[in-house]
Image: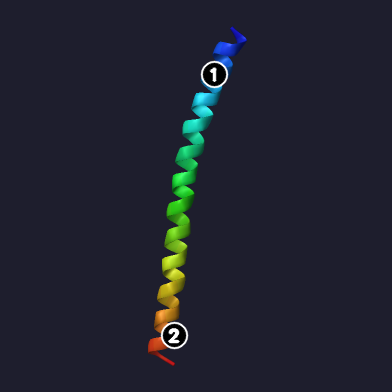
Amino acid sequence: MNYYWYSIGLTIGYYYAQKIGREAVVKINKYQTEKEKEKENQNQYP
């Protein structure tokens, strides 16, 4: 019985971690593109 709940917990944790990981990647990509836009704006208006 313990193994049953353990495997369920692992599965939920795995999917939860994947979801968090994907959101983190999206946030990081957004942050990087904003940084690059700032650099481009600085280059356009010295």
Disc 2 designates what residue? 42
Using a 10 Å C-alpha cutoff, classify the residue at mark 1 as few (fewer than 14 neighbours), some (14 to 19) or many (20 or more).
few
Among the 4 quarters of the image, the one containing residue 38: bottom left
Identity, as a three-letter code, of the amino acid under mark 2: Gln
Front residue of 27 and 14: 14
Where does residue 37 sit, x and y in percent of width and height? 40, 75
Disc 1 designates what residue? 7
The quadrant in which the C terminus is found is bottom left
Q: Is residue 16 left or right of residue 45?
A: right
Residue at 56%, 15% (x, y): give it.
5
User: Given this view, does label 2 or label 1 mark the residue nearer the observer?
Assistant: 1
The quadrant in which the N terminus is found is top right
Q: Secondary structure at mark 2?
A: helix
Where does residue 15 sit, x and y in percent of width and height? 46, 32
Residue at 49%, 42% (x, y): give it.
20
Using a 10 Å C-alpha cutoff, classify the residue at mark 2 as few (fewer than 14 neighbours), some (14 to 19) or many (20 or more).
few
Where does residue 16 sit, x and y in percent of width and height? 49, 34
Considering every residue shown, the one lying at the far top of the view is: 1
Where does residue 11 sit, x and y in percent of width and height? 50, 25
Residue at 43%, 69% (x, y): give it.
34
Q: Is residue 12 positioned above or below 31 on the image?
A: above
Q: Secondary structure at mark 1?
A: helix
Q: Is residue 44 positioned above or below 2 on the image?
A: below
Tell me, yes or no, whether the two marked residues, 2 and 1, touch with CB atoms within 8 Å: no
Identity, as a three-letter code, of the amino acid under mark 1: Ser
